Image: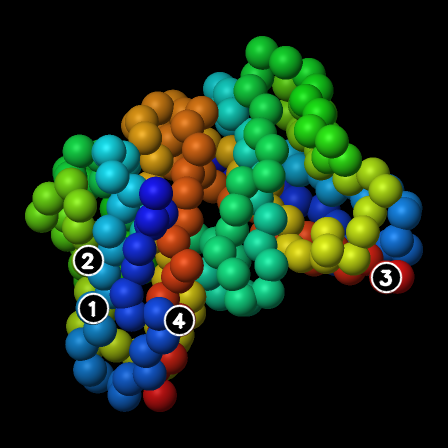
């Protein structure tokens, strides 16, 4: 199993540019999560999809952030326009079932720096 | 919604000593409590979890205990080794029973040879 695959692994972009992060969940998993990790705020849940449908996006910080899951094997997190305070590690994760108690597997993360 | 508090934020021990990290949660309906280990520059990885129908679970040198009455759970690492040095996160499900985890702030464990 290849695990959760994220791209790009590292991105440096200028303030105001659009950033698109990509994720391929583990095959057969129907729950997908986007987390953001910073020193100040720790691991924050941004959005959660189940069966490609956004279930909870209450963690999305503001309208500049959007996420989509057009099919079971692909999701994107977009930031437009990006700001320096968006610099963080963005993790995508997936799990096999929607209900509590199923292991969540993280991808390697996308390290974003906005200058 | 769920709130997870984790202590201590940093922990330094000598190799061979034990380490204990504690977490409290707010939602009495929470029923699943995983612990993740994150090495520097790597992704969080599950090391052990416990469900609300048991009070303790062990896996070699690590164990987790759960006190549902007090709403706290702890990670215990015995005979610590330098490779145990990492950041450890506890988590609990966000309210609603779905598999959305809310993480504690993390504990940076340093094991000194």
Return the residue at label 2. Answer: A76
Quarter holding the N terminus of chain B? Answer: top left
> In the image, is A104 to the left or to the right of B83?
left
How far apart are the alpha carbons under marks 2 and 4?
15 Å
- Where residue A20 is drawn, which disc sits there? 1
Disc 3 chain ID: B
Return the residue at label 3. Answer: B112
Count the marks: how many? 4
Residue B22 appears in the picture as rendered: yes
Q: Are marks 3 and 4 on the same chain?
A: no
Rendering coords of residue B35 (x, y %): 59, 39
Q: Residue at (35%, 70%) from the top-left corner?
A: A9
Q: Residue at (57%, 44%) from the top-left corner?
A: B36
Disc 2 chain ID: A
Rendering coords of residue B85 (x, y %): 72, 57
Q: Are marks 1 and 2 on the same chain?
A: yes
Q: Secondary structure at mark 3?
A: strand
How far apart are the alpha carbons under marks 3 and 1?
41 Å
Is residue B111 positioned above or below A26 on the image? below
Q: Are marks 2 and 4 on the same chain?
A: yes
How far apart are the alpha carbons under marks 4 and 1?
12 Å
- Give the image quarter of residue B75: top right
- Give the image quarter of residue B5: top right
Q: Secondary structure at mark 1?
A: strand
Name the front one of labels 3 and 4: 3
Q: Residue at (49%, 56%) from the top-left corner?
A: B43
Graded by Cα atoms within 10 Å as few (under 14), some (14 to 19) or many (20 or more), the crowding at tag 2 reads: many
- Where residue A111 is drawn, which disc sits there? 4
Q: Are marks 1 and 2 in contact (CB under 8 Å)?
A: yes
How far apart are the alpha carbons under marks 3 and 2?
41 Å
Q: Residue at (49%, 65%) from the top-left corner?
A: A38
How far apart are the alpha carbons under marks 3 and 4?
29 Å
């Amino acid at each position: 199993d290849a695990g959760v695959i994220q791209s790009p692994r590292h991105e440096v972009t200028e303030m105001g540019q659009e950033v698109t992060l990509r994720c391929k969940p583990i095959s057969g998993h129907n729950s997908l999560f986007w987390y953001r990790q910073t020193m100040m705020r720790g691991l924050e849940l941004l959005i959660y999809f189940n069966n490609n449908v956004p279930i909870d996006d209450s963690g999305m910080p503001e309208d500049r952030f959007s996420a989509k899951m057009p099919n079971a094997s692909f999701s994107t997190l977009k930031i437009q326009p990006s700001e320096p305070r968006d610099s963080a590690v963005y993790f995508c994760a997936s799990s096999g079932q929607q209900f509590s108690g199923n292991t969540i597997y993280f991808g390697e993360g996308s390290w974003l720096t906005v200058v | 919604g769920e709130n997870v508090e984790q202590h201590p934020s940093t922990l330094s021990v000598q190799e061979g000593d034990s380490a204990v990290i504690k977490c409290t949660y707010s939602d009495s309906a929470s029923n699943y409590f995983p612990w993740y280990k994150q090495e520097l520059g790597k992704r969080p990885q599950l090391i052990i979890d416990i469900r609300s129908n048991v009070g303790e679970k062990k896996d070699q040198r690590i164990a987790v205990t759960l006190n549902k009455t007090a709403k706290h759970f702890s990670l215990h690492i015995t005979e610590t080794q330098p490779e145990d040095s990492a950041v450890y996160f506890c988590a609990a499900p966000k309210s609603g029973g779905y598999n959305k985890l809310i993480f504690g702030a993390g504990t940076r464990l340093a094991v000194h040879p």
